[in-house]
Image (spheres, rainbow, N blue to C red):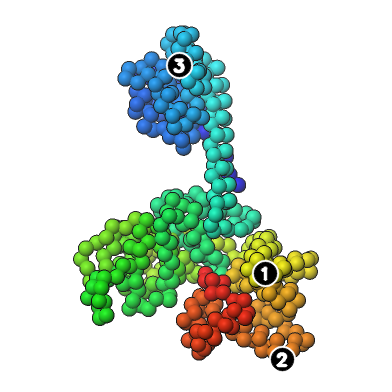
Amino acid sequence: MIDSLPCNHIIVIDDEAMIRDSLKQLLNLEGYTVECFNDASTALSKLNRRFAGVVLSDINMPNMDGLTLLDQITAFDSELPVIFLTGYADVSIAVKAMQLGAYDLFEKPVNEHLLDCIARACDKRSLVMENRALKVAVQKTSAPGVRILGDTPKMQHMMHLLNTIIDTPTDVMIEGETGTGKELVARYLHDRSNRSSCNFVAINCGAVPEQLIESELFGAASGAYTGATQSRKGKFEFAQGGTVFLDEIESTPMSLQVKLLRVLEERKVTPVGDNKAIDLDIRIVAATKVDLLSLVEKGEFRADLYYRLSLVKVNIPPLRERKADILLLFKHFSSIAATRYHKAPAPLNSELQQRLLAYDWPGNVRELRNQAERAVLLGVELAFSVTKTQGQGELSPDLSLSEKVSFYEQSLIEHALEINHGSIKNTMEALQIARKTLYDKMSKYGLNRDMFID
């Protein structure tokens, strides 16, 4: 949804103070916001394509006259309304002004027709700005890259916020339960922004050993610690010009939080064992699945770091709060799985729809995606009959022993991948199996580590 953009800003340009003052008083009484300038060149520096208003200018002025001003405005925005005032009627000047694209021209002193003209010009400018905003929104939605699906009001509100801040340099805090898609939102912010040509670097703060996280983020000079035989570029420097995604920010050790705060404030990073700071041009997107403010109140997270990161907060609603999106998402994931596994999409009949909508999906979008993939791989009946661990049904007594063993094995692998956020190494260790064995079984059950990365 594109909000209506108000157009009530009038820039008045006239070299006579009395004219400027009288116009400002008149327009203020009509509810307009007015800025006055005594020369065109100064006013021109305030104008751009984002200006939501109208220009009201004298024609005959020293240094830069009105027609030259109009020519320069038209060069960057031919749809910005410019209304001229003139102290004397000159047909040739009036004709030239209209040919150059002036919205209208009035002879001084002004009358009520000027106010009518300004109101029409503001309406036109509002429509232009609204159409431009709509085009940008359509381009962002249809552009290649990450897409976020959802038609519910909560999702539309979230998308409006994301599109508003996409190209701003501000850092962002993403809040959401496990499985809601926090990294997806972070990638959307990166891929659709003016930083998309640079690196997106994702760091799971809870998965990096505490003794290594500082060098992992900031880099290390040669000889900084045992085994550091050469300089190592940190994740922040590697993301230069792009985005750093700090997932599970609540897991950041307290000892590192003060250093992280300094990096955020100064936009400089000093590698471990080095004295030379490196200037950074990065955007920080942090994510948490817990109530970070409650950790601040308990003294388990620095308040200054919290407030520095949460200048803009994006809350991802859990799936149970946007159930109207469930069928859309299931159909989407089913289509993707059908293409990947060369099978038919899961048929979304009324019985399946009721089943999907009756469930609360504690694992959120990730759980729904996994269920859609199972429905494609195993068929709807078998997929839903073997999802005991998800609370959607019991193991069917009609299953053979091998099918029950396969189900149990698949469930254990899925659980291990889930708690280890898709880490193959940690899943191997948890299940105590070889890497090749794990990959073979993941292939057998149609599992992909990306399915478990939040």
Q: Nearer the viewer, residue 245 or 27?
A: 245
Badge number at residue 401: 2
| Amino acid type shown at disc 1 | His
Q: Are marks 3 and 1 in contact (CB under 8 Å)?
A: no
| Amino acid type shown at disc 2 | Leu
Say which element carries label 3. strand
What residue appears at the point 74 percent right and 89 percent down from the top-left corner?
400
**Image position, residue 391 (x, y; %):** 68, 78
Instruction: Tell me how far mark 2 sits from mark 3, CA to CA.
Output: 90 Å
**Image position, residue 179 (x, y; %):** 56, 70
Q: Earlier in the sequence, mark 2 or mark 1?
A: 1
Badge number at residue 342: 1
| Amino acid type shown at disc 3 | Leu
Q: From the viewer's perspective, is the residue at label 2 or at label 1 nearer?
A: 1
Badge number at residue 85: 3
Q: Are there few (<14), some (14-19), or many (20+) residues within 10 Å of tag 3?
A: many
What residue appears at the point 34 percent right and 26 percent down from the top-left corner?
41
